[in-house]
Amino acid sequence: MLKRDLLWSWAAIAAMVALLIWLLLQLGRQGADAQIVAARTRASAICQIMRAGSGRMTLNGNNDTMDEAVDRAVVDMALREDAGFEGGLWTEQHGVFAYAFPTYDGSGVKDDAPAAELPRIAALARRTLAVGAGVDEVRPGLREAVVYTACPLSKNMAGWTMTRVATIADSALNHLTLAVSLLLGSLVMAGAWFAFLLMRWGREAQRLSALLVASERMAALGGLAAGLAHEIRNPLGTIRMKAENALAAPPARRQERTEAALQTTLGQVQRLETLVSSLLALTQSFHPQRAPVALAGWLEHCRLTHAEAAAEMGVSIALDVEAGLDQATRDIALFDAAHMERVIDNLLLNALAHAHAGGHIVLGAARGDACLRLSVSDDGSGVPPPLRATLFDPLVTGRVGGTGLGLAVVREVVQAHGGSVALDPTHAQGTRIVLELPWP
């Protein structure tokens, strides 16, 4: 969650950087220098339009008589798409003529060339006719700069344009550009530092996570060791007590107490062997050998294995197999029958340990969504609430004499099959353990 929030924050900084870069580009386009460059570029295009239209201009054999209306129409057409541009034609004989300012935003139509600019226009026109190429000139000013351009249209005639670029706010614009540039630099540095911190925090989080996992493993190992010590100490204590009683008995009763001590010792040794076997089974890696299993027959075999012991306790074990699964043509499942039989044995033994005389145990099977659902349920006293969250952890047991490893082995075997095991919280009375295995 924290890493995602930090990534969103870094993305916001990156977005602000991109926005400031765009703003700087826009400010750059508004600067006087950029506008002058744009004006020169556009004036060159206007010159090309004038030159293309010069074929419509009517000249006599001496090239000194022109149709003013046609000439002005050509100039007007060339300037019409460019706001702020005015221009016309020039010859040595006629001077400035065919003047047009189609985008003039004052009242009326402006058709007279600015008298104060005529000498500069004439000088620029003479220069362009002399060199045979377009020329331009910029006159700087406090409030505005004027950009003049001229280009040859024929041997004796030149076209010219003039436009004004505002410079009164250029200083303020430069200051604003500088401020935005500094802000952009600060954001870039902040983003880089934030990215560095993000990577360092990520590495630190991984290190802390590894430490947490290690500490959890040590805690689990400590709990397992404490549980094992308790489980081993009780049988050893019983054996020692019986042995001491037998040795301290008077000669007349020593034989009797010795035999009783040996019987008790054998029982406690059997308990220790069961504990060690379960622990070894829990620590070994399971590699299921999946094979087709006739489900109905396999479940009946598991039931019969414990039927005699259940009958002696006055408890019944019944099968509850979903319709269709008990048919020979449809009950083929894939799992390790030997390992899963051990799972069912552990669950049935637990159910028998908690069942009362006259009680009922049900071994069930049903199809789920892409899974086989096996279950063992009883109507006993159920799992105490404090044990439910840790029911499948090692050395957790709710019955006297239990090792607390049977359900842990159940979980390991089922997970090795790619399945899951859980306590059914909806079971009304007693306990119901549900296994889900992948269905082929």
Image (spheres, rainbow, N blue to C red):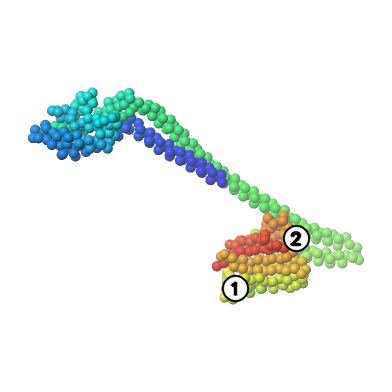
Task: Specify the amino acid type for callout 2.
Answer: Arg
Q: Which residue is drawn at 11% across and 31% down?
A: 64
Instruction: Please state if 316 lies on the left or on the right of 290 as rendered.
Output: right
Q: Residue at x 68, y 62 (%)?
A: 427
Please give the residue where the numbered disc 2 appears in the rendered image.
399
Helix, strand or loop at disc 1? Answer: loop
Q: Residue furthest left?
A: 61
Please give the residue where the numbered disc 1 appears in the rendered image.
324
Q: Nearer the viewer, residue 330 or 340?
A: 330
Q: How far apart are marks 1 and 2 (CA)?
A: 37 Å
**Residue 278 picture location, percent across and down:** 69, 62
Residue 272: quadrant of the picture: bottom right
Residue 270's place in the image compared with 184, above or below, is below
Instruction: Please state if 361 lies on the left or on the right of 107 as rendered.
Output: right
Q: Which residue is drawn at 51% across and 39% down?
A: 194
Q: Residue furthest front?
A: 108
Q: Residue at x 65, y 60 (%)?
A: 422
Helix, strand or loop at disc 2? Answer: loop
